[in-house]
Structures are given as structure tokens and as C-alpha cells.
Image (cartoon, grey):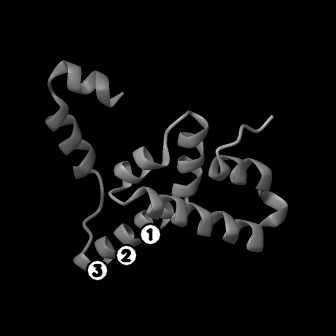
Amino acid sequence: MWKRVVDRGDAAGVAQSAIDQFPEVDALEALAANAAAVNLLIGRRWYVMQEAREAGATWEAIGTALGITKQGAQDYYRRQIENQEKYAANFHDTARARAVLDGKEVQ
């Protein structure tokens, strides 16, 4: 939808109209919403890292995309999958998660 709006050239007007429909919030409410959004995104980052690896991305490319080193990306991913194994083992595909860390293909 937004691409069509941008292509029509009225993106700013449509965006402003959508924004105007939201209630006013104060700075603390905005910060709380920001923190919730950031936590949600960061909490799911490892899923996207896994998909990137399965699609052929290198750890170096993933680190660059995140603004960290290759080693930092690997360490972050490793910690996250260890947490999944510890706290959500019944809902976690350990073999798949570890395969991208080890650079192996999962059948």
C-alpha cells in the first residue's frame, strides 16, 4: 500500500492523515512504546539471523548489517539459541538453529 502511495507522489499527505488519527501521547508514553517496539524487534532478531544464514549470508555480512563484528554476531546468536534451548526447548528446533551456527545444511 505505501509503495503505491509513494508512487502517486502524495506519501507525505497520506502519512500525515494517518498520523493525525492517533491520539496525542506524552513523552513518557512515547518512550514506553519505543522500548516495547525495540524489545520486540531485538527479541526476534535471532530468527532473522537464522533465516539470513539459511539464505546464504555470511556471519561477516550479518555483523555488518547489525553494526557489529562477525564474532559479535555469532556470539549474540549463540547466546540467543542457548536461551531458547534453556527456556523454550519444547518450541525450539535446536538442530536447525545450531546448523546455521556450524555452517551445516539441515535436511
What is the C-alpha distance between the residues marked 2 and 3?
6 Å
10 Å neighbourhood of mark 2: few (<14), some, or many (≥20)? Answer: few
Q: In the rendering, which numbered label is found on residue 32?
A: 2
Q: Are marks 2 and 1 in contact (CB under 8 Å)?
A: yes
Foreground label between 3 and 1: 1
Q: Are marks 2 and 3 in contact (CB under 8 Å)?
A: yes
Amino acid type of the residue that numbered disc 2 sits on in the rendered structure: Ala
Q: Position of residue 105 (x, y in %)?
A: 72, 37
Residue 30 versus residue 44 in the image, above or below: below
- Residue highlighted by disc 1: 36
- Kind of residue at disc 1: Ala
Task: List x then y, in percent, for residue 102.
Answer: 67, 51
In the visual, does 40 lie left or right of 10? Answer: right
Q: Which residue is mark 3?
A: 28
Cα distance between the residues tagged 3 and 1: 12 Å
In the rendered view of the protein, which quadrant contains the C terminus? Answer: top right
